[in-house]
Amino acid sequence: MALAATRSRSVIFVKHKILYPVRRTCLFSTSDTILADQRKPPSKKQWRKSHKKPPSTDHLSWEERLADVVTPLWRLSYDEQLELKQKHQERILSQLSRNLSGDLQSQSPSPVRSKLSFPVLPVLPSPVRDGYRNKSTFSVNRGVDGNPKTVGFYVGTGKKGNIVCVNGDHLLNMPEKHKLVARCYQDFIRLSSLESCLLFHTGGHWRELTVRTNAEGRTMAIVYFHPQTLTPEEVAVHKANLVDYFTWGPGSLCQLDSLFFQESTMTRCTHEESPYQLLHGQPHIYEEVLGYKFRISADAFFQVNQAAAEVLYSTVRHLCVPNPEEGGGRTEVGGTLLDVCCGTGAIGITISPRVDRIIGIELIEQAVEDARHNAALNDVLNCEFVPGKAEVVLPGLMSKLSSAGGGLVAAVVNPARAGLHHRVVRALRNQPAIRRLVYVSCKPDGEAMRNFRELCCAPDPQKKLTGEAFSPTLAVPVDMFPHTPHCEVVLLFER
Ligand SMILES: C[S@@+](CC[C@H](N)C(=O)[O-])C[C@H]1O[C@@H](n2cnc3c(N)ncnc32)[C@H](O)[C@@H]1O
């Protein structure tokens, strides 16, 4: 494979605002270099224009370009990756400290550590570094050779019209099983009489593929399909072909435990918008985390790296309700814990032995059903899960909890990248019984930063933020995504 990396310390500045060391390669042949040196020096305008452009990637193979998109830290050792992530998290969290202290204009690149008003612990590494993903979603588009039935990941952008779909077999975060299912799906759609769907409005049918696996190697595949003008009877023929291919045809190599099919005319549809149709096998996949078993439906979220999820959840558990045996210094056990954006219930269920009661709130109905099932599956009797948008459910729930009389221990929130709705922040902040709030974010520099500021600013009656302010007291980054710049951060707020 072309990805044997040479490591060096040269650095480029890219959109994530992390300094990525890049492999220093010979960009031109010797003769190119001589030609380049003999060219007229560029005008000021040309120079400025050329220096605004991102570095050219023309010299890289397609595999390298894709690896740079999906796993941009792949050339670094794992220790170097952690060092970068640590600095990146500290930079974001020092920005939070500055925002909170009102020092908004300070953008100077002075040492970040001195700006932090609370400790940031060293990034907790992922116990598994390669092939850790338990879920991958593959696109279908034109490949390097122009074949429109290519299954892989995008290099380029739709905006620039230069998308190329590159096979992801070399990606370090991808398990072998995902690669195998993607190759088989590609073979299948190439045999099919139906076209692939590159743009919704230009026709075609075969769309993305999602593959989910668990630690035992069980495999769920979900095929997304645009029906266009096909009748249900016509679609049924192609569904039957798909089942045949994966059950007794060449695709049986994949040993799929579940095969789902979703007919959708939008980028993403929930089960309610367009049902996940089970064409073959089991309706769920199961994963084990911290000794608890979790059922996961096709539509439900689950942390993408099972081994790192154990690290994340034990960190969250410790920060929500410290156990004296773990040296937490606090001894209280009991009361109610709110698990906002609870998915399949994993955080609440793993904390359940330490509290009297867990109340989870989750938007996706299949995930709520999973969470309820998971509590029963693990003989956990003190969890209840409420379906709906947290911004709708939580304000009403808060008043009920208040009238039931105290007992709230803490709240944990783990929203998607979009962060929490301001009504959720308001409800949490204005509930005086919550003294401890744990915020788990995969993007603390995005919308979550707005949430942090609203949790911690001085009371603001105009924004209906009347409760006592929280302060961040500890941050623990957890590496859920080796080879990428991303990281989960667990932030403890207290008041
Ligand atoms: C990052 S996941 C975390 C799930 C869970 N805490 C876990 O660790 O598996 C975010 C979850 O928030 C849910 N979600 C998104 N928007 C929501 C909203 N407005 N109200 C409630 N849940 C929401 C998503 O469906 C998803 O399950």
Image (cartoon, grey):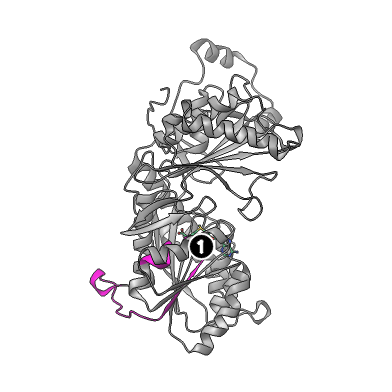
Above or below: residue 232 compared with residue 351: above
Instruction: From the viewer's perspective, tell me whether residue 268 is left or right of residue 115.
Output: right
Where does the image place residue 351, in percent across and percent down from the top left? 37, 69
- Asked if the magenta segment contains residue 135, the reply would be no
Where does the image place residue 293, in percent across and percent down from the top left? 36, 58
Quadrant location, the N terminus: top left
Front one among 46 and 340:
340
Where does the image place residue 312, in percent across and percent down from the top left? 38, 58
Is label 1 within 8 A of ligand 1 (CB to nearest ligand atom)?
Answer: no
Quadrant location, the C terminus: bottom left
The outermost residue toward the left is: 325
Question: What residue is drawn where x is 56% and y is 79%?
Answer: 397
Which residue does the numbered mark 1 point to in the structure image?
Answer: 369
Where does the image place residue 343, in percent across and percent down from the top left? 50, 60
Instruction: From the viewer's perspective, tell me whether residue 399 is left or right of residue 372.
Output: right
The outermost residue toward the top is: 31
The amino acid type of the residue labelled 1 equals Glu
How many numbered dots are placed on residues in this image?
1
Binning the other alpha carbons within 10 Å of mark 1 as few (below 14), some (14 to 19) or many (20 upward) gives: many
**In the rendered image, which quarter is residue 264 located in?**
top right
Residue range in magenta is 323-350
Look at the numbered disc 1 and give the secondary structure of its residue.
helix
Evaluate whether residue 485 shows in this view. yes
Instruction: From the viewer's perspective, tell me whether residue 290 is left or right of residue 304.
Output: left
Front one among 110 and 448:
448
- Asked if the magenta segment contains residue 347, the reply would be yes
